[in-house]
Image: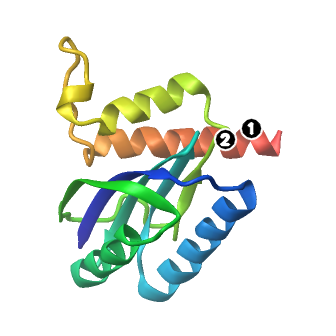
């Protein structure tokens, strides 16, 4: 099993275009046994992908040349023992995220130079980060149900 995390800056996209990206991702991922999480907030994407290495790396190359975004920065990649998002073809967090939650996520995936000197530099693929993302997803889902 393999995972990959990247971030990018979106070109000007409508909410319909972002929904299209999400739907395309989910369809492709279901067909290729890829799971993960897509975070979109104020024109900024963070995506976590997991699956077979060859498929994930080929998908990332396709993502890198997609004209709907730019400044695609690979944050982390490598082998993993098990999936973090095993039940989601593509979990999704969007502008519905409270600002403080998104700032936490942004801190988690920022390169060292963007993190204030006193901060602990986390590993963006650490279990704690992805559990935090899952908790945010679950809270948003519960909020929608109420």
Q: Pick the quarter of the image with the C terminus.
A: top right
Q: Is residue 52 above or below residue 100?
A: below
**Near-viewer residue (111 or 141):** 111
Q: Which residue shows up at 61% across the image and 52% down it?
A: 12
Mark 1 nearby-residue class (10 Å; few <14, some 14–19, many ≥20): few
Count of labels shown?
2
Query: Which residue is pictured at 38% across the width and 58% down the height?
Result: 48
Residue 118 % position (x, y): 20, 11
Q: Quadrant of the N terminus?
A: bottom left
Residue 66 against residue 13 in the figure, above or below:
below
Q: Give percent across and percent down for residue 91.
A: 54, 58
Q: Position of residue 102 (x, y in %)?
A: 50, 32
Q: Are the residues flagged by discs 2 and 1 in contact, CB closer than 8 Å?
A: yes
Residue located at (51% from left, 82% from top): 28
Q: Determine the image quadrant of residue 111.
A: top left
Name the residue beneath numbered marker 2: 140
**In the image: residue 136, left or right of residue 126:** right
Which type of secondary structure does the marked residue at label 1 adopt? helix
Pick whichever, 7 or 87, lies toward us. Answer: 7
* Marks 2/1: CA–CA distance: 5 Å
Is disc 2 placed on a helix, strand or loop?
Answer: helix
Return the residue at label 1: 143
Residue name at image x 35 percent, y 29 percent: 107
Left/right of residue 78 with respect to residue 44 in the rendered view: left
Name the residue furthest bottom.
31
Snapshot quadrant of residue 47:
bottom left
Numbered circle sitting on residue 82: none
Spot occupied by residue 72 in the image (x, y as percentages of width and height): 34, 56
Q: Residues within 10 Å of mark 2 (few under 14, many from 20)?
A: some
């Amino acid at each position: 099993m393999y995972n990959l995390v990247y971030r990018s800056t979106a070109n000007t996209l409508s909410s319909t275009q972002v929904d299209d990206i999400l739907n395309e991702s989910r369809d492709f991922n279901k067909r290729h046994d890829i799971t993960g999480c897509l975070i979109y907030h104020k024109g900024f994407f963070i995506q976590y992908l997991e699956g077979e290495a060859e498929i994930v790396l080929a998908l990332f190359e396709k993502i890198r040349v997609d004209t709907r975004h730019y400044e695609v920065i690979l944050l982390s990649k490598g082998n993993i023992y098990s999936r973090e998002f095993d039940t989601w073809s593509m979990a999704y967090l969007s502008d519905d995220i409270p600002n403080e939650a998104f700032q936490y996520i942004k801190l988690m995936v920022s390169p060292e130079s963007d993190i204030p000197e006193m901060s602990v530099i986390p590993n963006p693929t650490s279990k704690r980060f992805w559990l935090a993302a899952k908790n945010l997803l679950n809270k948003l889902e519960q909020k929608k149900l109420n």
